[in-house]
Amino acid sequence: MDTSGVKGIAEYSGVDWTETTGARLYRKARKLIPGGVQLLSKRPERFLPRQWPAYFSKARGCEIWDLDGRHFYDTTIHCVGACLLGYADPDVNAAVQGAIDRGNMSTLNSPAEVELAELFCELHPWADMVRYARAGGETMSVAVRIARAATGRETVAFCGYHGWSDWYLAANLGDHDALDGLLMPGLNPTGVPRSLAGTALPFHYNRIDELEAIIDRTGGKLAAIITEPLRDVPPQDGFLHRIRELADQIGAVMIIDEISAGWRFCLGGAHLTLDVEPDLAAYSKSTSNGYPMGAVIGRREVMEAAQNSFISSTYWTDAVGPTAAVAAIRKMEQVRLSEHTMRVGAKVHDGWRELARRHGIHMKPHGQYPMSHMAFGHGEKNLALQALMTQEMLDRGYLSTGAFTVSLAHTDEVIDGYLAALDEVLAVLKQALRKDDLQSRLKGPLPEQGFGRLT
């Protein structure tokens, strides 16, 4: 591992983060780009306002260099889980470079589309056909469109987070806090046609009674029942199998959204470990290790309905996306990736528990090992504790917010260094709690919660 760019805490703690190159560029971006960034999950205000390094100049493995050359280990969301093999994986990059050199786009189609479709169907014996997109949100929109075309129905029931599209945000048209427990509070459906009200009905994970109530209320006229396979908790009391039964009973399409979970729990997706076969499954994120790619896979009788609706886009035919996906999936299989993410994730959880015990801080791990987060238990002080932890870890060369998404690049050496730094930081937090001076130790505002405008 190249650590030549690592700075010491003395140098980091003296940085005026508000006047770094990245901070100046972000101030400009806020005037030019609505929201400042393209992805809400990358908005600096959500991590540490005025201090979080907004831009990178280079990324490799789990290491990032900002615009001023400062080096950090990414021990937080790791590109929202998009690069499961680590940033700039050499094998995926080599495959992509070959596709670029041969020509990424032409009037004809890339044969990589067929190779990737065959690979998906090999990994999922229940699936017969594949359609592509290039991002998670649009991939889920394709899946919903296919389900509606196949059933001739409009209304969908769902649990979990499934993107930004109109079909999903329509849940907030009739009840402005319908999505609060599924994603974050304050998602305003402004711009979503009012006529979509009542077409997207949310229920909570492991609450099959809520889904049954929706079926009763709608007379079972659902186009689709959509769920993530798991997120913070696994299915309980046959939750996924009961969804499968209900979908069959009412003639709805069962869709599993593997965009966040897929590949990190099992080669092919978490639902394969849970012994459930949907009608459609959606993939994106780490499928192609950071290169834009999305896929909807499914049973022939459902997927054929895609031909009865207009679902088409020029950039869904580029060669880079499927080429990157084939290379990434082959490598994930070769290195037994899910075994690594589970083992390293467990090590992080164990480390959090031990450090919390050692310093007498109420802090517990939550979520599944490959994509987990910690939660403080100090009431109204929790957000300030999170901010101070992020600030102190930043000074030690770690991007750390309490969330931890594991990649292949998170080696034992990286995790040991991360936990050693966190050990020092929790000692600072313990002192701040004892002196009751959390706020005075912060160099800027608290992180924003939920969805908030910049102006």
Image: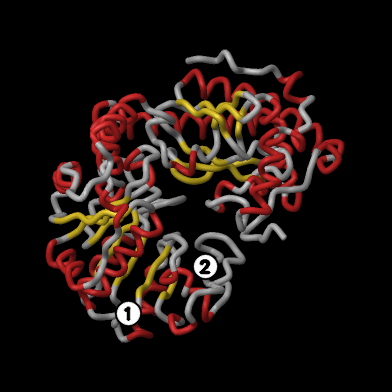
Placement of 42 over or under 55, stated as above or below: below
Amino acid carrying mark 1 in the image: Glu
State the image coordinates of residue 17 (x, y, percent, origin top left): 74, 34
Q: Which colour style is shown?
A: secondary structure
Rendered location of residue 398, percent (x, y): 61, 28
Give the amino acid type for the residue marked by disc 2 in the picture: Leu
Name the residue: 70% across, 24% down: 424
Percent position (x, y) of residue 106? Answer: 23, 46
Please tell me whether mark 1 sits on a helix, a strand or a loop: loop
Q: Residues within 10 Å of mark 1 (few under 14, many from 20)?
A: some
**Residue at x 12% of width, y 62% of height:** 300
The residue positioned farthest toward the front in the image shown: 107
- Sequence-wise, which precedes: disc 1 or disc 2? 1
Residue on which disc 2 sits? 179
The image position of residue 383, as x and y in percent, is: 71, 48
In the image, 190: left or right of 44?
left
**Which residue is disc 1 drawn over?**
154
Q: Residue at x 27, y 62 (%)?
A: 312
Viewer-closest of 22 and 175:
22
Quick check: 28 left or right of 334? right
Give the residue at x 54% y 64%: 181
Callout 2: helix, strand or loop? loop
Indicate which label's residue lies in the foreground, 1 or 2: 1
Asked which quadrant contains residue 44, the reply is top right
Q: Nearer the viewer, residue 313 or 108?
A: 108
| Residue 19 numbered tag | none
- Tag 1 and tag 2, C-beta contact below 8 Å: no
- Quadrant holding the C terminus: bottom right
